[in-house]
Image (tube, helix red, strand yellow):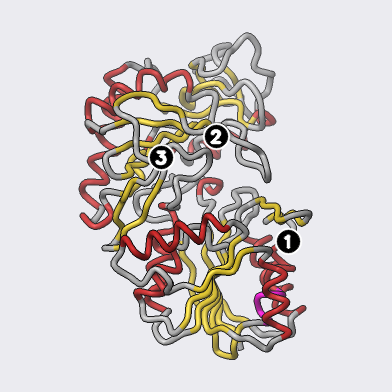
């Protein structure tokens, strides 16, 4: 028993931590954290003083600390950091196929014992995402370890501590070391080639966590009319084209996204004009399609958590029901919808309820016939439900 040391949490929080949950929520603390700065190492104990592990301090927000060790005694040395990086890389080398090894996640935060950040490999370059101020405590030590172990051409970092909100102008990714990357860096996934920009402010142009969803879309596309809503750089469209779709229509608010899709098609040896491009508000296009009785056999719906087109703001937390209703009205009988949510705050029950209500409002019957989550290079501790943010629902529409 360690009485009077570290911080103490409620019995309920202690049960969660002993199951492997990696976050200490501020509301679970028996006393406020005082005199601690971002990244400070603090021992976490239960109400009776029994040690539960060690965490690095978050100075503000709902999370008070992120667990980095469950040992009774712990000092976060460079050797320990190096060992965690080595274990993360070894896991990917053992599990990932060569055709995706050049575009994969090498470190996935809490799932790899490096909380508050992630590291993607994009061709010869590494892109670090920093999601937490606590991660600043070890980031400067981590970068040379990554450089030594992986020998990338260069390393960049996106600062995501404040998250991404609609219309907010974000700075480009920071160049940390090595050479600068070209704005059109070519990476490969399953034989298709995509142009990415590791210095981009928000996304380099390819969401690695959607890989399994893209594979499913390719399997389902043959002979079908495919509508790809919120298409971004067209990664689902490429899969549908290669899968033998009869028609592929991409809808996105940004014309530059369609231009990048054409580049990706050409780089992959496909017809650059194979996808029809519609630029503007997805809801308005869905209504026009409904009025024209235009139907699709497969609709991919992958909205960002927040977006704005002119004066209309989409929020995944409140607008999935309306989006589902509009989508169901353009699906042919016997068609399918891939409904994709990456909004961490939208839980499973809320998403499924919104999908169900939207279908009923459209007077359509739907059945969930499959679902997907994160791919194998995005590991998550079993008790860490918040880490399973990606939800891909395969729906059949009568």
Please state if 268 lies on the left or on the right of 55 as rendered.
Answer: left
Q: CA distance from mark 2 to mark 1?
A: 24 Å
Q: Residues within 10 Å of mark 1 (few under 14, many from 20)?
A: some
Is residue 326 or residue 109 the one in the foreground?
Answer: 326
> Along the horizontal axis of the image, is 326 left or right of 339?
right
Against 379, residue 239 (above or below) is: below
Category of crowding for the residue at label 3, using alpha-carbon neighbours closer than 10 angstroms: few (below 14), some (14–19), many (at least 20):
many
Q: Is label 2 in a helix, a strand or a loop?
A: loop
Q: Secondary structure at mark 1?
A: loop
Q: Is residue 256 above or below residue 299?
A: above
Quadrant of residue 26 within the rendered picture:
top right
The reply to whether discs 3 and 2 touch (Cβ–Cβ < 8 Å) is no
Which residues lie in the magenta part? 325-329
* Circle 3 SS class: loop
- In space, the residues marked 3 and 2 are separated at their CA atoms by 14 Å
How many numbered callouts? 3
- Mark 3 or 2: in front is 3
- At a point 67% along the width and 52% down the height, the residue shown is 307
- Residue under label 2, please give it: 160
Residue toward you, 224 or 49: 224
Look at the picture and state if 291 lies above or below 311: below
Question: Which sits earlier in the primary sequence, circle 3 or circle 2?
Answer: 2
User: Furthest-top residue in view?
Assistant: 35
Between discs 2 and 1, the one toward the N terminus:
2
Q: Which residue is mark 3?
A: 198
Choose the circle earlier in sequence order: 3 or 1. 3
The residue identified by callout 1 is 319
| Percent of width and height locating residue 128 | 41, 34
- The residues tagged by marks 3 and 1 sit, at their Cα atoms, a distance apart of 31 Å
């Amino acid at each position: 028993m360690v009485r009077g040391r570290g911080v103490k949490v409620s019995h309920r929080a202690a049960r969660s931590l002993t199951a492997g949950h990696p976050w200490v929520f501020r509301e679970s603390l028996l006393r406020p954290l005082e005199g601690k700065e971002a990244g400070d190492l603090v021992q976490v104990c239960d109400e009776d003083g029994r040690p539960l592990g060690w965490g690095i301090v978050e100075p503000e927000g709902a999370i008070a600390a992120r667990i980095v060790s469950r040992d009774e005694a712990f000092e976060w040395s460079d050797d320990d950091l190096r060992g965690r990086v080595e274990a993360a890389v070894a896991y990917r080398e053992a599990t990932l196929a060569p055709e995706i090894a050049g575009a994969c996640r090498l470190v996935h935060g809490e799932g790899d014992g490096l909380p508050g950040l992630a590291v993607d490999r994009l061709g010869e370059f590494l892109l670090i995402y920093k999601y937490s101020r606590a991660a600043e405590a070890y980031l400067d030590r981590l970068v040379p370890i990554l450089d030594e172990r992986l020998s990338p051409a260069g390393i960049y970092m996106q600062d995501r501590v404040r998250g991404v909100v609609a219309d907010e102008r974000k700075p480009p990714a920071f160049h940390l070391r090595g050479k600068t990357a070209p704005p059109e860096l070519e990476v490969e996934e399953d034989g298709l080639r995509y142009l990415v920009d590791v210095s981009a402010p928000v996304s380099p142009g390819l969401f690695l966590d959607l890989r399994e969803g893209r594979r499913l879309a390719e399997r389902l596309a043959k002979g079908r009319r495919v509508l790809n809503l919120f298409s971004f750089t067209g990664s689902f469209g490429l899969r549908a084209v290669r899968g033998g779709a009869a028609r592929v229509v991409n809808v996105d608010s940004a014309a530059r996204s369609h231009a990048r899709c054409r580049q990706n098609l050409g780089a992959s040896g496909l017809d650059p004009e194979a996808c029809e491009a519609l630029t503007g508000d997805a809801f308005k296009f869905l209504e026009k399609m409904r009025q024209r009785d235009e139907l699709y056999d497969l609709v991919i719906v992958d909205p960002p958590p927040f977006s704005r087109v002119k004066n209309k703001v989409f929020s995944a937390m409140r607008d999935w029901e309306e989006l589902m209703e509009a989508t169901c009205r353009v699906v042919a009988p016997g068609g399918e919808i891939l409904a994709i949510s990456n909004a961490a705050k939208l839980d499973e029950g809320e998403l499924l309820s919104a999908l169900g209500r939207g279908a009923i409002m459209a007077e359509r019957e739907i059945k969930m016939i499959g679902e997907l989550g994160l791919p194998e290079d995005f590991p998550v501790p079993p008790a860490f439900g918040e880490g399973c943010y990606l939800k891909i629902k395969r729906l059949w529409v009568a």
